[in-house]
Image (tube, coloured by chain):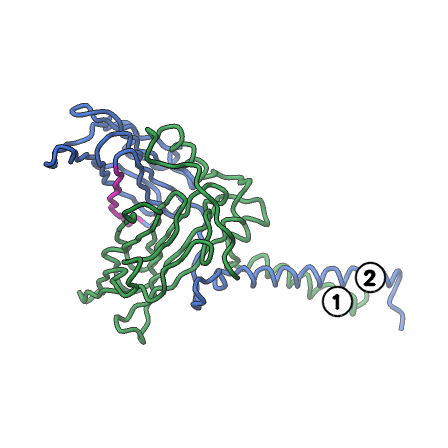
Amino acid sequence: MRTRDRFRWTIPCWFAAVLTATPGCNPSSINSLVDSIYPAAPGDVPMILVRIENNSSADINAANIIVDTGLAEPKTVSFPVARGTGNAGTLFQCPVLRVALGDLDLGVAPAMTATFSDGTQVEVPFGMRTLVEGVDYVCGDTIIFQLIDDRTAETGLRIEAGRVDGSTQTGPFTGADTFRYVQLLLLLQTAGGTTDTTGTTGTAPIP
Amino acid sequence: MRDGPNPPLRRLGSVLTITASACSLLCCLGCNPSFLAAIGGESVSTIDAGRGYVVILLINNTAFDVTAIVNVTKADGATAEWMLTAPAGDFGSIAQQCDIQAVEVEAVTYVDTSSGTAQGGAVLFDPEDAQLIAGQNLKCGQVVAISVAGAPPAVAATIEAY
C-alpha cells in the first residue's frame, strides 16, 4: 500500500477507535443505538420519573418534589440526597400536569434545604417556573433536577433541570425493563379504585 | 500520478470511512450528557441521563397509610436510609441508579387515621424473606417490591425482587 493511501486509511481508523473508547456519550443514546440495555425513562409506561441529582458540596436534607395530578391536593415526596454524586428519584403515574420543587405556584418557596460541610444550612429556591406537561415534558419522560455549586447564587447553590425523552426509551431492552415491571406489579397487586394505571400521554414539548 | 489499482473504489472507501467517523463524532457530541435536553431554556452543565435503575416499590393494599424504612448500601460501601410512604390503596417509590449493592427493609408500619385518632402498628414480615437483597439477588433494572395487605392486627408485607 502506498504511503499516501496508508495515511488516508490510518486517520479515520484511529478516529473511530478513539471515539469508540471515549466515555461520555449519553447512555440513552448508547441504549438506543447499541441494543438498549436498561431504560433511562418510563418510555411508553404511563409514568414520569423525577430524579434529584446532587453534584454540589452540600448535603440535601430534603428535596421537596411536588406534582399536580389534577386532584384537589398535589402529591408531595421528600427525601434527602447526599453530597457528591448522590441521587434518588420517584415515580408518578400520569397524568402529571405540573412539576416543581417546593411549591407549584409561588416559585420562590424553598425547593430544598441543604447543609454544607461547615454546618451552614440554606434553603435553596427553585429558581425557575413550574414545569408544565406538554411544554416542558410529556408522560414517559424522566425529569432530572440537579443541585450544583454556584458562587454567584445567594445560597451558593443552584438547581438545574434536564429531561430524558421517554420516546427514546421504549425498548426493547436486553436488560430488565424496569418501569414495565413496576406497571405490571401495580396492575396485579393494587387493590384498585385509587390508582389509575392507564394514564394519558401528552403532546410533545415545544422545542 | 498513479493512485494504484481500482482508484475509484479506494476513494469511495476513504469517503465512507471518513463519513462514518464524522457521524460517530456528531452522534457522540450531540448526545453527550452535557447536551442533555434542558428544560425552560436553562443551560445545563452536565447531567447524567442514567444507566438504569433499581426501583424500591411500596405497594399499599390496605386502608391505611403505610411507611417503609429501607437501608440502601451503595457500591462504594456508603449507606443511605430512605423512607417510603404510600397512602391507602396507592404506592410509593424510590428509584436509585444501579450503583447499589444491597437493599434492606428495616421496618414497615401503618397508621390508621379513620377513627379520628391516629392508631397504628408494625407491619409483619418474615425477617428471612429477602430482607437483605444483595449480590446475585440484586441486579440493575430490578424492582424490589414491598407489598402490604391485610387489616389490623394482621397487616403483613411480602418482599420480593423482580
In the rendered structure, are the residues bearing label 2 and label 1 in contact, judged by CB atoms less than 8 Å apart?
Answer: yes
Give the magenta range: B77-87
| Residue B10 numbered mark, or none | 2
Picture residue at 39% right of the left edge, 51% below the top = A97
- In which quadrant will I find the N terminus of chain A? bottom right
- The chain drawn in green is A
Name the residue nearer the viewer: A1 or B98.
B98
Residues under labels 2 and 1: Cα distance?
10 Å
Tell which subunit mark 1 falls on.
Answer: A
| Magenta-drawn stretch contains A83 | no
- Tell me, by letter, which chain the rendering colours blue: B
Secondary structure under the numbered disc 2 in the rendered image: helix
Numbered disc 1: secondary structure: helix
Image coords of residue A181 (percent x, y)? 43, 35
Instruction: Check the image and name the residue furthest to the left.
Output: B117
Q: Amino acid at mark 1?
A: Arg
Query: Which residue position is annotated with label 1?
Result: A8
